Image (cartoon, rainbow, N blue to C red):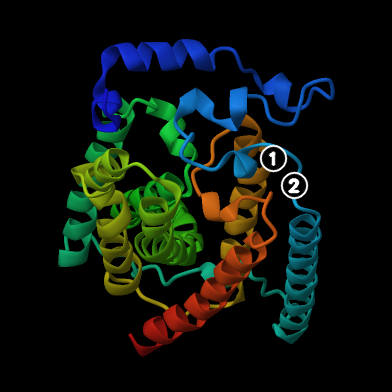
Amino acid sequence: MTEAEQETSPSSKTTNRHHLRRFSVSDLVNPNKPWVLTDSGSLLGFFDFVPRHLREGPWSVAATLALFAIMYVLVIVMIGVNGLHGASLNSGIGIWDEFAMAPDAYLPYTLCWYYNAVTFFWMVYVTWMVKTESSLSNIAFVSFTLWSWIIITIRHGLCVLAPFVPKVRIIAEVLRLPVLMSASITFGIWNFVLMPAITFVFIKEAERRWNFVKFAFGFRLMQLHIFNIVFAVLNSAWAQPRRPLHLGDLNAIFVYMATYMVFYYFVLDRLGIHLYPIFSPRAPWVVFSWLLVVALCVYGYHWWSAVLAAN
């Protein structure tokens, strides 16, 4: 059975769900359990294309030290920047207050409002397709790609509600930069780094390589990896209201990225879900992958700051 057929096979879905019931949340905190909880470090065999030394075994010492060093430096920098920014603000004004928009900022029944409404329902439809047609079903939603897709979808919906429910506006504003940055990272890393690496480096067999290429350029993945940036830009950089970025936005994207990193390395890695082999902590060269993401975040913040300021 090909990978494409496995995606939609009812028997495959049933087998997968039965297999997944073997795991529980308690396994992740049970000290008597091994770090890698799945056979060969590949959940359901989906990640057998990843070299075994990137799925099993101890983490690279250099990578582990670098990970904690990078996180330590970023936390210290964010604390320092927030401290300086807080001291410069007028008394009684906090970072949360900077997300506040004018009462008439979100207007109903405009071109932007109709765009957000139509696209919200389209993205919900694609999400439903991912859940019902993927052999991984709910497990697909652990990917950074789906996290990004979900918050883009949510922000479209919030922008539809915002003219009528003022309390949702601050959530929409907090999500502005995470939407833009997560879509940018997904689009850039998948299309120009990860997909070529999986196609030409990790998959050795010609037939499996061709099946993967067809899968990668299928309807669902095209939506998730190409149209995601289109929807993100239209929603957060084109549609009204637009505003310049501020430090609160930087805090939002830092928390978002750090949360997914912890989830990926301390939950998915243990379950044998290796969605992004170039970020395996078992290879010392993963440091370059991490630094690439940090650089993309820094550059992306300045890029989107300039775009939104120009608008």
Mark 2: few/some/many CA within 10 Å (<14, 14-19, 20+): some
Q: Residue furthest bottom?
A: 310
Q: Secondary structure at mark 1?
A: helix
Q: Is residue 184 left or right of residue 6?
A: right
Between 288 and 206, the residue placed more toward the observer is 206
Q: Is residue 71 above or below residue 20?
A: below
Q: Residue furthest right?
A: 31
Q: Residue at 60% of width from left, 28% of height from top?
A: 40
Give the residue type at disc 1.
Phe
- Residue 59 has which mark? 2
Task: Name the spot of residue 179 as percent of width and height, x first.
Answer: 42, 60
> Which quadrant of the rendered structure holds the N terminus?
top left
Task: Name the spot of residue 130 as percent of width and height, x first.
Answer: 30, 34
> Which quadrant of the rendered structure holds the C terminus?
bottom left
- Residue 103 has which mark? none
Between 296 and 40, the residue placed more toward the observer is 40
Query: Mark 1 — residue?
Result: 266
Foreground mark, 2 or 1, reads 2
Q: Residue at 24% of width from left, 44% of height from top?
A: 210
Between 124 and 165, the residue placed more toward the observer is 124
Q: Is residue 27 left or right of residue 261?
A: right
Task: Name the spot of residue 241 as percent of width and height, x first.
Answer: 33, 72
Q: Residue at 44% of width from left, 37% of height from top?
A: 141
Q: Quadrant of residue 67?
A: bottom right
